[in-house]
Image (cartoon, rainbow, N blue to C red):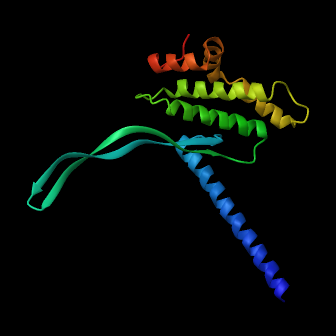
Amino acid sequence: MVQIMKVIRQSYEVKVLYNLLYISFGFIRFLIVRVTRNPYDQGLTLYDDKATIKIVERCVRRGADMKVVTKKKEVKRDKVVAILLLFGFPKPIIGATLAHEMGHALIRLQGWTFILERKVEEGICEAIAYEWLKYKVPNYDPSYTQKEAAIVEWLRIQEMVREARRAIKKYGLKRTLKHVAHWRNIPE
């Protein structure tokens, strides 16, 4: 009887763990779709871009009491909080998605005081993901299934990426980012 109860408890714990994972997976999927408005996105970079600080304006002393007058001020602060990735995809896809999201983190941590156009930022991030994919998967690998090979090819030839890929190939990532910081577009 004791062993039966132990097995029941273990299966219950596994079921609870599975339900927690399923809920968290569902929540991450919901969060990604809700924020990006795209059901095909596989990752999301979360960041905190504002912080509230207290500034002491003056101190007023009345007898033994001291009153500190402060005011709150919001300042721009770029801090990457998390990178969320959906699991269950082939390794090259997860790697490319991680490289893409790390591109967003890299751009966010540059400390620029402006927001890039979506086309420019996505182009740079997709170009970073493409370069990673080209490094990791130089040619078609026969161990891939047909679907995985199709996904890899789709990631390689997206229209939005061509400009950024060409600029990174011609000038390098560092010079391209400097140009984007100065002119807010991808170099010709």
Most distant residue in the left direction: 63
Vertical comparison of 31 with 179: above or below:
below
Name the residue located 81 percent from the left edge and 36 percent from the top edge: 148
Quadrant where the N terminus is found in the figure: bottom right
Q: Position of residue 8 (x, y in %)?
A: 79, 79
Residue 19 placement, left or right of 91: left
Name the residue located 84 percent from the left edge and 84 percent from the top edge: 4
Kindly indicate the quadrant of the structure image that contains residue 75: top left
Quadrant where the C terminus is found in the figure: top right
Number of numbered callouts drawn: 0
Residue 113 placement, left or right of 58: right
Name the residue located 55 percent from the left edge and 35 percent from the top edge: 105
Most distant residue in the bottom direction: 1
Visible residue check, residue 170: yes
Vertical comparison of 106 with 120: above or below:
below
Most distant residue in the right direction: 142
Kindly indicate the quadrant of the structure image that contains residue 44: top right
Most distant residue in the front direction: 64
Q: Position of residue 57 (x, y in %)?
A: 19, 45
Q: Position of residue 35 (x, y in %)?
A: 53, 44
Vertical comparison of 23 with 178: above or below:
below
Query: Observer-nearest residue: 22 or 57?
Result: 57
Vertical comparison of 175 with 82: above or below:
above
Visible residue check, residue 153: no
Q: Position of residue 26 (x, y in %)?
A: 64, 55
Name the residue located 15 percent from the left edge and 57 percent from the top edge: 66
